[in-house]
Image (cartoon, grey):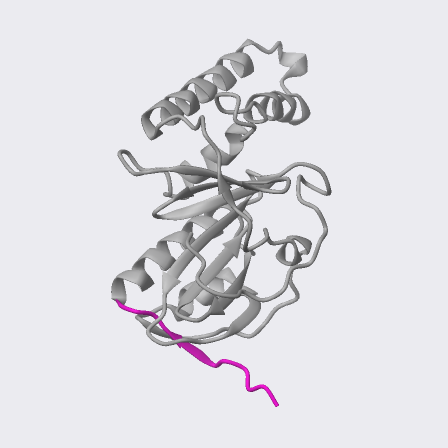
Amino acid sequence: MSVPVQSLRLADEREAEDLSAFLARLIHYDRAAAVRLQAGGGALAVFGRPPSFEVLAIRTARLAEPVHLDVTVSAGELLESLGGAEFAVPAAVTGPPWAGVLPPRGGWRELPGLPDVATMRGALAAAVAEFRGRDEALPAERRTRAERDRIGREIWSRTVAGTGLPLRAVHAAQSLGFLRPGVPVELLSTGAWLRLRTPFGSVAVRTGGIGGLPLTPTGPLGGRHTG
């Protein structure tokens, strides 16, 4: 009989600090956020979905020893448990629909055409400025949540330099601390999925299905997951 994993030990304190920062950012957008944990071999992958961006965010951490784990837990409880490199795994929760809709592990290939970080951050700044300008220009009778949401969807659904990656994925990567000045970035693809990867984490997105994500369950993590 399989024995549930009660605790995990990360490779060092820095891994715990980085994972805590990621969880805190997720909770900023959703205080009731859940995360799916998958551990395979010497790596832990933590998946979350900040609702403002409609993307999957992925943060990985090195483990001190190989463990196999696949469970969905409260992001807040996990953050509270993370007092150091070794921490207790919170009790499992009923996962939201996205928790069963993770990107495939294999088959990723790099796509050309992704701009550098400075260019993407400039595009984000321009998009924010455009949103504010269009919002301020709305007559009083049209300054509603629905109209603002419509403008936001139009702006953040635009693709980056013709790559097919929606601007909201880049916005999420910056807001979650993944898109930092001078870091290398990659655009990867498998099937209908696109993934923006940096050394600090990844953002994955695809079109179709509910909220931009298909309802296709995935199995447990196998092998090393690199952000």
- Residue placed at 45% from the left, 46% from the top? 202
Instruction: Give left or right: position of 224 versus 212.
Output: left
What's drawn in magenta, residue-wise? Answer: 1-12
Tell me where residue 128 appears, x and y as whole percent.
45, 22
Tell me where residue 59 appears, x and y as whole percent.
43, 54
Q: In this view, does 66 lie above or below 49?
A: below
- Residue placed at 56% from the left, 21% from the top? 155
Camera-nearest residue between 173 and 2? 2
Q: Tell me, yes or no, whether the highlighted magenta stretch contains residue 6.
A: yes
Tell me where residue 37 appears, x and y as whole percent.
51, 65
The number of callouts visible is: 0
Quarter residue 81 falls in: bottom left
Q: In this view, does 186 lie above or below 7?
A: above
Instruction: Give left or right: position of 162 versus 42.
Output: right
Q: Which residue lies furthest to the bottom in this view?
A: 1
- Residue placed at 30% from the left, 59% from the top? 17
Quadrant where the N terminus sits is: bottom right
Tell me where residue 61 appears, x and y as whole percent.
37, 61
Q: Is residue 44 above or below residue 54?
A: below
Q: Tell me, yes or no, whether the highlighted magenta stretch contains residue 25.
A: no
